[in-house]
């Protein structure tokens, strides 16, 4: 149950705390006072889509929190969230002007998607435009599946259908025009031949680039090595560094035992001579190994150019080109053996079609069973809503297998005695749509664990006796679940256990909205205003009082 809704800087609401009660809660107010903003705030804290325009002008952020009690939902654990030891759960969402969202559940950071999932199991909002969904016959099957809980046969059907769709896609890819097929095979053979003649080797590009860089700097390389070799090893006319260190080492040899310091110097010269000698030999070897050839440089440059041209057509690297070559070989092989593959797929397709039709038949059977029950439930609900002569039926038609099954499902109704059943979209008035949707929502809600139902002006197009029946139906529902209802009808507002007024005012040049819980006398005045507008007479007040008494008597009979 929703205990407390806290709102900060949402549209014209600067700050508001609404403490909802068990049973039937009604919100009324002048048009434009901000009743829809309360619904927007609820939608936001449940993870619904929001806009930066929702933030109050002059504020850089908005905040909404909703405190729920009696929470026991297994799905919460999947989001890493759990109610406290008293079964209480606090959902929070902060919206910033730069479009960022910060969501929490009992203080734990969560994503908007997780918030939406959690909120969807706690509270369900039925908007004033939901009745329009009944006009969309594509939604009728979804309503029926939701009521019939056909998840298992629907999942089995979709598995079969997905396999069928995959096979059809493979067959389509093989069934191409012969001329197009011949052109494609020629193109593949040319590309394969060009890549095979190139004799690509993984990693060769890096080696070529390193060798080319060396060859391009061959003279500088030789000159540097020669200079280092001369400095270390010397030449015909002079000794090098190795010889000089050896002479210094020999000069200290005879006195190395006279003093520890001299011995250390001798040892260091010996080490230096060995290290310099090793370096000198390495430089001499490198100089001997390097063979600078202009012809080799031309060959390396030519190979690099060839790889560059191929990369422009077949991939950014040699490895990419090798992968492309393999894919071309695979595609060509598949095309050359397409007839055999196609025959095999055709056999598999026939079996997949049979499995899909079979799974579809099981799904249809489950839906028909659910439809028979749903028809009776809706018919009863409509009688309670003063639509005794209305007949409701669910029509089944067949269609080729599709993602949602093999059924065309339509809700039909007959508004008057003696008239044939026809699609709802063709004959239902606005008030009838509202009541049919209310009946459907009530039936669906009975099967769900959601503890709070929100009705946002679902009484549109309803008045008089029908409005009273809608009020009574909501009162009945509120004995099983918490009901929050935004309404303009006095019958609905009077039936509520708890009545809130949404009032708009002006202070300091700014518009603000506040939400006030009404006592008996305030409710009477508000009902009189709803009934008579600005002219609230004594007769209207007396009538409002009688309406409250009648509602209280009806609620008492439900206990």
Image (cartoon, rainbow, N blue to C red):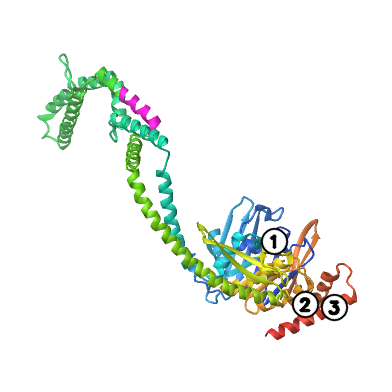
Disc nearest the viewer among 3 and 2: 3
Q: Is residue 290 left or right of residue 54?
A: left
Q: Mark 3: few, some, or many residues within 10 Å (few <14, many ≥20)?
A: some
N-terminal of the pair, mark 3 or mark 1, is: 1
What residue is disc 1 on? Answer: 426
* Towards the viewer: 494 or 69: 494
Q: CA distance from mark 3 to mark 2?
A: 17 Å
Left or right of 447, for residue 210: left
Q: Nearer the viewer, residue 321 or 138?
A: 138
Mark 2 secondary-structure assignment: loop
Q: Which residue is mark 2?
A: 519
Look at discs 2 and 1 and give the one toward the viewer: 1
Estimate the x, y position of residue 88 in percent, counting from the top left. Answer: 57, 73
Work out whether mark 2 precedes mark 1 in sequence or the reverse, and give the earlier one.
Answer: 1
Quarter the N terminus occupies: bottom right
**Circle 1: is it few (<14), some (14-19), or many (20+) Cα within 10 Å?**
few
Residue 489 lies in the magenta stretch: no
Badge 2 crowding class, 10 Å Cα cut-off, few under 14, some 14 to 19, many 20 or more, is few
Q: Quick one: quadrant of the C terminus? A: bottom right
Task: Read off the residue under disc 3.
Answer: 543
Give percent across and percent down for residue 268: 18, 34
Q: Is residue 478 above or below residue 242?
A: below
303 falls in the magenta region: yes
Predominant SS of the magenta segment: helix
Q: Nearer the viewer, residue 439 or 69?
A: 439
Circle nearer the N terminus (3, 2): 2
Element under disc 1: helix
Residue 484 appears in the picture as rendered: yes
The answer to which image quadrant residue 452 occupies is bottom right
What residue do we see at 69% from left, 61% from top? 426
* Residue extent of the magenta highlight: 302-314
**Which residue, as the protein is rendered here, is positioned at the far top?**
237
């Amino acid at each position: 149950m929703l205990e407390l809704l806290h709102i900060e800087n949402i549209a014209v609401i600067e700050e508001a705390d609404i403490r909802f009660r068990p049973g039937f809660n009604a919100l009324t107010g002048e048009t434009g006072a901000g009743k829809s903003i309360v619904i927007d705030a609820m939608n936001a804290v449940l993870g619904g889509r929001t806009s930066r325009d929702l933030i109050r002008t002059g504020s850089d952020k908005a905040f909404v929190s909703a405190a729920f009690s009696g929470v026991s939902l297994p799905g919460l654990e999947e989001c890493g969230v759990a109610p406290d030891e008293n079964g209480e759960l606090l959902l929070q969402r902060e919206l910033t002007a730069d479009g960022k969202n910060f969501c929490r559940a009992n203080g734990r950071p969560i994503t908007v998607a997780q918030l939406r999932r959690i909120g969807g199991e706690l509270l369900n909002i039925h908007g004033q435009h939901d009745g329009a969904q009944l006009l969309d016959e594509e939604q009728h099957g979804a309503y029926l599946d939701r009521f019939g809980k056909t998840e298992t046969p629907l999942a089995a059907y979709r598995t079969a259908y997905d396999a069928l769709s995959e096979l059809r896609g493979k067959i389509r890819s093989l069934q191409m025009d012969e001329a197009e097929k011949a052109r494609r095979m020629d193109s593949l053979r040319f590309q394969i031949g060009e890549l095979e003649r190139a004799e690509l080797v993984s990693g060769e590009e890096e080696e070529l680039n390193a060798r080319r860089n060396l060859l391009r700097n061959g003279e500088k390389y030789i000159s540097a090595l020669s200079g280092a070799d001369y400095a270390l090893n010397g030449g015909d006319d002079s000794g090098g560094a190795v010889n000089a260190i050896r002479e210094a080492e020999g000069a200290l040899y005879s006195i190395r035992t006279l003093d520890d310091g001299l011995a250390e110097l001798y040892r260091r010269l010996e080490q230096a001579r060995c290290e310099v000698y090793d370096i000198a030999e390495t430089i001499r070897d490198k100089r001997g190994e390097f063979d600078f050839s202009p012809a080799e440089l031309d060959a390396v440059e030519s190979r690099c150019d060839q790889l560059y041209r191929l990369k422009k057509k077949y991939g950014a690297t040699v490895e990419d080109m090798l992968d492309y070559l393999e894919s071309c070989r695979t595609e060509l092989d598949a095309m050359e053996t397409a007839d055999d593959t196609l025959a095999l797929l055709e056999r598999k397709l026939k079996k997949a079609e049979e499995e899909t039709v079979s799974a579809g038949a099981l799904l249809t059977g489950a839906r028909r069973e659910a439809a028979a029950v749903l028809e009776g439930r809706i018919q009863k609900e409509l009688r309670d809503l003063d639509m005794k002569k209305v007949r409701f039926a669910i029509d089944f038609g067949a269609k080729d297998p599709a993602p949602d099954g093999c059924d065309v499902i339509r809700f039909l109704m007959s508004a008057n005695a003696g008239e044939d059943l026809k699609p709802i979209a063709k004959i239902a008035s606005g008030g009838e749509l509202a009541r049919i949707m209310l009946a459907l929502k009530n039936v669906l809600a009975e099967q769900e664990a959601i503890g709070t139902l929100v009705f946002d002006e679902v009484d549109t197009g309803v008045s008089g006796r029908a409005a009273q029946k809608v009020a009574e139906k909501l009162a009945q529902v509120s004995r099983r679940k918490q009901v929050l209802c935004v309404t303009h009808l006095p019958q609905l507002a009077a039936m509520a256990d708890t009545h809130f007024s949404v009032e708009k005012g002006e202070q300091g040049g700014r518009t603000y909205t506040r939400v006030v819980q009404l006592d008996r006398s305030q409710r009477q005045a508000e009902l009189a205003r709803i009934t008579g507008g600005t002219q609230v007479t004594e007769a209207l007040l007396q009538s409002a009082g009688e309406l409250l008494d009648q509602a209280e008597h009806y609620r008492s009979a439900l206990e």
